[in-house]
């Protein structure tokens, strides 16, 4: 029993729809009915699933049955559509037929109406399938690359395809109805009759023979005919044949012969499959790989000679080739060989379309050496990491020599590094095999040695026989083949062999990679040593700086404090104005010492960082600095990650700078006028900036030509300033990893912008 007929029943009465489904499906396996209550639902189901027929009521809410038919025909022009309605009239029946319904049936009483409905649906679907199969057959016939024909029992052509029309040059009207002798010679007519007789008298289904097709212009086409009987209801009605152009096949055979002569010279294994994955050709390398005669391979499915995994991978690639995703497919896998072992191999696949068919060509290449090469590259990569971890030139040289032996197979080798004092390439490390072959490793210098010459030129050199080179270091040496690999400016790696021509291009390439890694490692060791020396020098400088700071802090501050005290006492006793100037000079010296110590001891360093809320810190800083009638405007609620004490020092210095330089009063009176005499008071504003914050005042500002130098130690435009306040600001910003720049504020004063703060 075949698949059930899938019916979409459209009726707005659910009870009646359920009854129809129940009755039609009572004969299990014949019908599969799905109900829809209206046209909209029916169209949705047709878009989602395949049905063999639609049975629809006429009167329904929204679209009626004929309106549904019109919508169905847009996407399903041939789908059987039966109008099954309770409203019956000749007018409706006529309208339904005109609209293109497959059948029209009026609802009745009892279950007998459903038997009629089942027969109508079954007949409509059978006709629909038959018509579709016929259309497919005709389409295949016309799409065939070979010429196809059918003859009745009298030898008259009843069917021809487009290919036969094109080949012969006759029209379809000329051919159909004409005797086969129009395009076939008498000998071929006789062969055709004999073929039909043989098919009738034997169990053979196909008879094949070669013949000649005659064209309208008097030409001929050599063909191969495959003839079979044409039967209908068990009665022979004639014969049908497929003609294939033998000229094309012969040319293909000649090409194949040429290809075979080429393939036979290849070391790679080559095979060709037909569309059924049957082997049609293998070269001698493929047969040798399998250990059998090629005649045992040709005609067998490839699956009998390849493992399941390889077949599966190849099929996946074949699908991609067929879909046009690529032109050549590549599969890497392990292949079985004659002795039962395996080899890593690369399978390259290509599809070739010939005469309407597809041939599948495969080329198998042994990639054992390539895999070894790849493993060596991986090992070199791992060794490079070990080399970079080395801490001395000697360790790098030792690791380099061991890698050349263990990874590259350059057993006898040594590393010579340049020694500036000796002006020579001095041996630093060698393998045991190298020391055995060369009893005493020499140092190379001057232009009279191959090693020195290669080192100077910086290019690798593989010498087939060093005894043929006039610059050989030791004419009595047992060494014959040598490989010289420059290690940058640092030295050279030399591999030796007692056999001439021991090193190939692959050894050179891999050796260059190793030599490059050794050079990089030596450069890092050199750089590390320089950094270590620099660190030691910085440590010594810091110690001297700390000693200096101690002297300044103790030995200079104490006498200064004494001088300040004595001057104060003298002022109280005498009231001499000169003493007031002296006191101011001593105060300035004290401030200068404090700033110098801040730079010297703290510099570009910070303590432990923590989240600091700027509004609270700014209020605290403002309270500790003499600001007179100045005003602080905090327009930020930013929290930053910082050393709070150093950040406080940064803001205090910026506030002092604003007070000292922000007033419009001239010269050294700026701060004094602002603080003591009610000069034009400064306003300091702190606000948000993308990636940071800004501090600006509304004073006289900083001229553009001085903005690059205001952070330099000692730079000041005020007689009372030390010139170190903004230098300290920059040091604190740098210590936190921030950037600071000065520009003009909104009111024309100085604006300091701090960016690069990151998250708190």
Image (cartoon, rainbow, N blue to C red):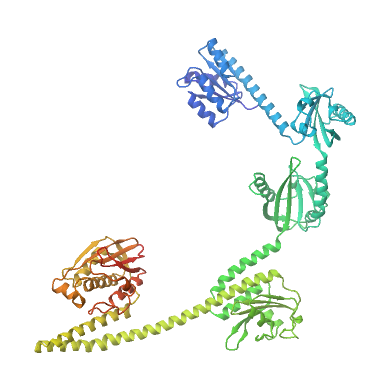
Residue 389 in the image: above or below residue 237: below
Residue 285 image offset from top left, x and y in percent: 79, 56
202 left or right of 629 in image: right
Quadrant location of the C terminus?
bottom left
Q: Looking at the rendering, which quadrant does residue 155 occupy? A: top right
Residue 628 image offset from top left, x and y in percent: 16, 71
Q: Looking at the rendering, which quadrant does residue 245 occupy? A: top right
Question: Looking at the image, which residue is at 30% across and 63% down?
Answer: 693
Q: Residue furthest top?
A: 90
Residue 667 image offset from top left, x and y in percent: 21, 77
9 left or right of 245 in image: left
Residue 299 in the image: above or below residue 73: below
Number of marks in picture = 0
Residue 96 in the image: above or below residue 356: above
Residue 608 in the image: above or below residue 426: above
Residue 328 image offset from top left, x and y in percent: 68, 51
């Amino acid at each position: 029993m075949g698949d059930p007929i899938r019916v979409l029943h459209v009726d707005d009465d659910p009870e009646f729809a359920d009854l129809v489904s129940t009755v039609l499906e009572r004969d299990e396996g014949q019908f599969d009915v799905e109900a829809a209550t209206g046209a909209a639902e029916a169209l949705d189901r047709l878009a989602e699933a395949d049905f063999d027929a639609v049975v629809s009521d006429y009167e329904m809410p929204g679209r009626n049955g004929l309106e549904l038919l019109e919508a169905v025909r847009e996407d399903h022009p041939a789908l059987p559509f039966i109008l099954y309605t309770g409203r019956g009239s000749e007018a409706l029946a006529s309208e339904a037929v005109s609209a293109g319904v497959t059948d029209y049936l009026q609802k009745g009483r009892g279950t007998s109406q459903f038997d009629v409905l089942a027969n109508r649906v079954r007949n409509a679907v059978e006709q629909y399938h038959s018509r579709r199969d016929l259309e497919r057959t005709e389409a295949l016939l016309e799409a065939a690359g070979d010429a196809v024909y059918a003859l009745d029992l009298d030898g008259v052509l009843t069917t021809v395809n487009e290919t036969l029309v094109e080949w012969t040059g006759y029209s379809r009207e000329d051919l159909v109805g004409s005797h086969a002798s129009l395009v076939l010679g008498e000998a071929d007519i006789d062969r055709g009759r004999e073929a039909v007789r043989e098919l009738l008298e034997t169990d053979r289904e196909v008879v094949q023979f070669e013949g000649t097709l005659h064209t309208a212009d008097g030409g001929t086409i050599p063909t191969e005919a495959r003839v079979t009987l044409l039967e209908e209801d068990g009665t022979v009605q004639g014969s049908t044949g497929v003609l294939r152009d033998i000229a094309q096949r012969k040319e293909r055979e000649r090409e194949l012969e040429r290809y075979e002569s080429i393939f036979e010279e290849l070391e790679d294994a080559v095979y060709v499959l037909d569309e059924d994955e049957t082997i049609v050709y293998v070269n001698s390398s493929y047969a040798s790989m399998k250990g059998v005669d090629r005649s045992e391979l040709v005609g067998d499915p490839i699956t009998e000679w390849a493992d399941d995994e390889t077949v599966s991978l190849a099929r996946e690639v074949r699908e991609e080739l067929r879909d046009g995703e690529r032109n050549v497919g590549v599969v890497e896998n392990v292949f079985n060989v004659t002795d039962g072992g395996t080899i890593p191999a690369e399978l390259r696949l290509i599809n070739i379309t010939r005469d309407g068919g597809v041939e599948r060509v495969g080329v198998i290449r042994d990639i054992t050496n390539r895999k070894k090469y790849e493993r060596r590259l991986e090992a070199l990569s791992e060794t490079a990491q070990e080399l970079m971890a080395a801490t001395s030139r000697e360790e790098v040289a030792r690791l380099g020599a061991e890698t050349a032996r263990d990874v590259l197979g350059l057993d006898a080798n040594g590393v010579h590094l340049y020694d500036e004092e000796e002006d020579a390439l001095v041996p630093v490390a060698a393998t045991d095999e190298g020391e055995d072959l060369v009893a005493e490793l020499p140092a190379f210098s001057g232009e009279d040695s191959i090693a020195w010459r290669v080192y100077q030129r910086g290019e690798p050199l593989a010498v087939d026989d060093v005894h043929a080179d006039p610059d050989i270091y030791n004419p009595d040496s047992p060494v014959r083949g040598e490989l010289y690999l420059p290690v940058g400016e640092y030295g050279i790696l030399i591999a030796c062999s007692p056999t001439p021509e021991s090193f190939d291009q692959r050894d050179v390439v891999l050796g260059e990679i190793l030599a490059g890694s050794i050079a990089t490692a030596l450069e890092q060791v050199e750089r590390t040593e320089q950094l270590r020396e620099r660190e030691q020098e910085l440590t010594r400088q810091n110690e001297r700086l700390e000693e200096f700071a101690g002297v300044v802090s103790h030995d200079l501050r104490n006498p200064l404090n004494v001088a300040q005290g004595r001057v104060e006492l003298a002022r109280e006793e005498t009231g001499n104005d000169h003493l007031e100037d002296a006191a101011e000079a001593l105060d300035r010296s004290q401030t200068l010492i404090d700033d110098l110590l801040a730079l010297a001891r703290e510099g570009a360093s910070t303590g432990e960082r923590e989240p600091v809320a700027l509004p609270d810190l700014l209020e605290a800083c403002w309270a500790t600095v003499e600001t007179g009638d100045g005003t602080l405007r905090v327009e930020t609620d930013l929290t930053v990650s910082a050393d709070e004490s150093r950040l406080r020092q940064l803001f205090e210095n910026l506030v002092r700078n604003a007070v000292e330089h922000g007033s419009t009063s001239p010269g050294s009176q700026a701060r004094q006028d602002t603080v003591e005499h009610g000069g034009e008071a400064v306003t300091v504003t702190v606000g948000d900036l993308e990636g940071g914050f800004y501090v600006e005042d509304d004073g006289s500002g900083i001229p553009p030509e001085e903005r690059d130098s205001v952070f330099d130690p000692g730079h000041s435009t005020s007689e009372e300033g030390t010139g170190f306040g903004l230098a300290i600001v920059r040091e604190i910003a740098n210590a936190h990893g921030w950037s600071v720049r000065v520009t003009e504020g909104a009111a024309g004063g100085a604006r300091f912008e701090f960016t690069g703060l990151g998250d708190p």
